[in-house]
Image (spheres, rainbow, N blue to C red):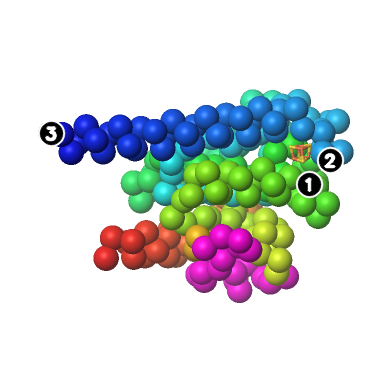
């Protein structure tokens, strides 16, 4: 019983610390004007989920629904992502989801390299504070920009990468928005999920 109380006190300190660090970081993001995306946003979209998640998902940029709500992946693509996660008993509340930039690019254009660079500090800090066991990059654009590559999605999926300054394995999934447009590719997501499970199980063995 004494050991359990000690464990709880020690871990509660860590949990409280990561929660307060993320809250402070979110406050900075809400005030941020480091790039031009600040002038057209309705809300910043910091990210949501478990502050101590084992899995962190990084998409490209907030869209219209996300900008209005201030939350990532709340539109149709977000619902499909939830379905994929549910199918292997992973729940969104246990995962941390964010994007490479925290403000919506106008007309949903791709974020520009200098915008991703301007926002990189926030993402870097999120990864450091959350310290997940695996990072999933959604889609070719986010993956190539984050990994500094120029590869097809076929060359990126099913492999383990590492981000500069981090030793956390990074894997690439099809973006759910692509699957909405190309539903026949849905079966490929099972391969992505299977690969994720393999990586997670390697921590148990
Ligand atoms: S996208 Fe990032 S760097 Fe640009 S204004 Fe928003 S929070 Fe700041």
Q: Nearer the viewer, residue 203 or 103?
A: 203
Residue in view at x 50 percent, y 60 percent:
168
Evaluate whether residue 203 shows in this view.
Answer: yes
Which mark is drawn over residue 118? 1
Q: Ligand 1 appears in which quadrant?
A: top right
Mark 2 CB within 8 Å of ligand 1: yes
- Among all residues in the image, which is located at the extreme left? 1
Q: Find residue 1 and report its horizontal and vertical position in percent.
A: 13, 34
Q: Say which label, 2 or 3, has the lower sequence index.
A: 3
- Along the horizontal axis of the image, is 105 left or right of 178? right
Q: Nearer the viewer, residue 61 or 77?
A: 61
**Viewer-nearest of discs 2 and 3:** 3
Which mark is drawn over residue 73? none
66 over 190 or under it: above or below: above
Whether the residues at callouts 1 and 2 have beta carbons within 8 Å, the answer is yes
* Mark 2 vs mark 3, CA separation in Å: 52 Å
SS under mark 3: loop
In magenta stretch: residue 158:
yes
SS under mark 2: loop
Mark 1 CB within 8 Å of ligand 1: yes
Please provide the residue range marked out in magenta: 150-167
Q: Which residue is mark 2?
A: 35
* Mark 3 vs mark 1, CA separation in Å: 48 Å
Q: Say which label, 3 or 1, has the lower sequence index.
A: 3
**Viewer-nearest of discs 3 and 1:** 3
Quadrant in the picture for residue 156: bottom right
Q: Find residue 43 and report its horizontal and vertical position in percent.
A: 71, 27
Structural crowding at the residue carrying mark 2, measured as other residues with C-alpha within 10 Å and reported as few (<14), some (14–19) or many (≥20) = some
Q: Which residue is mark 3?
A: 1
């Amino acid at each position: 019983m004494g050991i359990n109380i000690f464990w709880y006190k020690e871990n509660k300190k860590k949990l409280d610390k990561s929660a307060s660090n993320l809250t402070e970081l979110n406050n900075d993001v809400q005030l941020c004007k480091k790039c031009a995306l600040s002038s057209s946003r309705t809300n910043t979209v910091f990210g949501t989920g478990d502050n101590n998640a084992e899995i962190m998902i990084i998409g490209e940029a907030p869209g219209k629904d996300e900008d209005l709500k201030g939350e990532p992946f709340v539109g149709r693509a977000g619902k499909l992502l939830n379905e994929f996660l549910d199918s292997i008993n992973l729940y969104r509340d246990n995962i941390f989801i964010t994007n490479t930039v925290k403000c919506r690019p106008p007309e949903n254009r791709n974020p520009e390299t200098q915008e991703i660079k301007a926002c990189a500090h926030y993402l870097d800090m999120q990864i450091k504070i959350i310290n997940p066991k695996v990072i999933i990059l959604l889609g070719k654009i986010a993956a190539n920009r984050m990994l500094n590559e120029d590869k097809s999605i076929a060359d990126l999926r099913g492999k383990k990468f590492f981000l500069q300054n981090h030793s956390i394995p990074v894997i690439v999934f099809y973006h759910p928005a692509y699957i909405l447009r190309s539903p026949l590719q849905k079966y490929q997501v099972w391969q992505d999920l299977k690969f994720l499970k393999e990586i997670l199980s390697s921590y148990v063995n």
